[in-house]
Amino acid sequence: MRQLIALRWLAVIGQYATIQLVFSILGVPLPIVAMFAIVGGLVALNISSMIALRRGWRVGERELLIALLLDVAALTGLLYFAGGATNPFVWLFLLQVVLAAVLLRVLSACIVVSVTSAAFILLAVVHYPLMLPQHITVGLFGLYVLGSLISFALIAGLLLLFITRINYNLRSRDARLAAMRQQAAEEDHIVRMGLLASGAAHELGTPLASLSVIINDWGRMRQLTDNPALAEELEEMRVAVERCKAIVSGILMSAGDPRGGDIAITTAGAFFADALEEWRRRHGSDSLRFDNRLSTDPRIVSDSTLKQIVWNILDNGREASGNTVSVILNRKDELLTLSVIDDGPGFDRAILDNLGKPYQSTKGRRGGGLGLFLVVNAMRKMGGWVDARNDPSAGAIVTLVWPLDMLEWTED
């Protein structure tokens, strides 16, 4: 419909210029009031169509057909007052036929063909004859050829403009379909990873539980606890086993298989402070700097998936830099943002261009790049998104963005 509106504006300009040229300069007598009334009707149609589109008017087959038929009616009225079928601009009907063939289904296109054919026959029988003034030296045949040339150039130009725009729209649609297919493939990939992770969790659950029991029993044996070195190693083993159990649960969450566990109503500041502090305890007190810039602290609904998303980004930043990771929590209008900044080498351009696709990694190991892939897809399912860029000074900045209405808790 927008393309039709643009073409109609061009047609209005051309019609107005042609009427003025023929009437004012060439001096051909025309019913100027009636012709300008038709042109004014097209202007009103365009304005009303633009207003309707801005208000969310849904355009379908019927609306496009009516719009084309109104254009045909307006062209028929103008040609009726300008010589009818003897006017070379009668071939502008072909433009309406081409538009119908491109935009409409076969039945609707046949309706346009039938209406334009009937209009042509009607104009051949009934029309307002053109009376050429005596001072026009060009013969009727020469004037007809000149008009045909102008008509041909006009039709060719408008078709070029319209078909070019339609092809652009088709390419854009194909790109969107390709992106949707890619998204579907990625979600299928996540489902398969979730199944594998679920199987691994079941397989690892029993040995991890056994190890946890054994380590706890060893922790009560005096011959081991009295030895400081052995006691320290036992504590490290216990922490490692608990970490393995948390990793298995985190994989299930990140792979798109959230269990709904640890769901709680809290505030954004408190949730992220607790999640970051828990991560800091595992990696050392100097592993993280946290800057809470929230002016107001909204209440949110949190779960383990949200925590695992944050941890995955922190793990990537820590692994990339090996130094302290900076985290900034902020709110911009109705968006909650968490920026993770490291001082590592930054992202390669290929990774930034393919953000969110699996196996995009500079770590050089098999299966690398899944962490960011899972984060991007988990964020997408939560209604948010991930923005990654390189810091001009050094390192990389990964920003997690959530619309507050997707996280915020309300009484409703």
Image (cartoon, grey):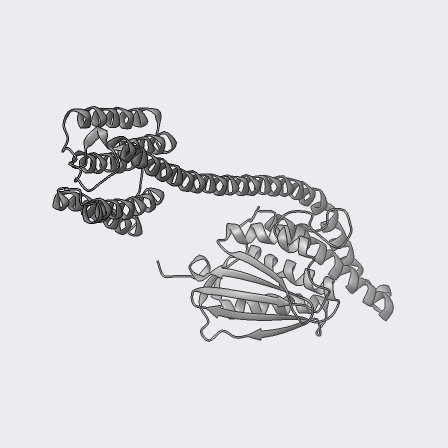
What residue appears at the point 57 percent right and 50 percent down from the top-left corner? 377
Q: Is residue 119 above or below residue 250?
A: above
> Does residue 138 appear to the left or right of 295 in the view shown?
left
**215 and 290: which one is in front?**
290
Place residue 104 in its image quadrant: top left
Q: In the rendering, at what x and y percent does residue 344 appear?
A: 72, 66
| In the foreground, 267 or 54 | 54
Residue 151, compared with residue 293, is above or below; it is above
Q: Is residue 176 in view?
A: yes
Q: Nearer the viewer, residue 166 or 332?
A: 166
- Name the image quarter holding the N terminus: top left
- Res. 65 visible in picture: no
> In which quadrant of the rendered view does residue 397 lie?
bottom right
State which quarter of the image contains the C terminus: bottom left
Where does residue 253 sit, x and y in percent of width and height? 59, 50
Give the x, y percent position of residue 8. 29, 44
State how many labels appear: 0
Is 292 in front, or is 201?
Answer: 292
Give percent across and percent down for residue 280.
67, 69
Residue at the image point whose x is 73% and y is 70% from the top: 323
Q: Residue at x 28, y 48 (%)?
A: 13
Up-down: is 184 above or below 48? above
Left or right? Give the position of 131 relative to 269: left
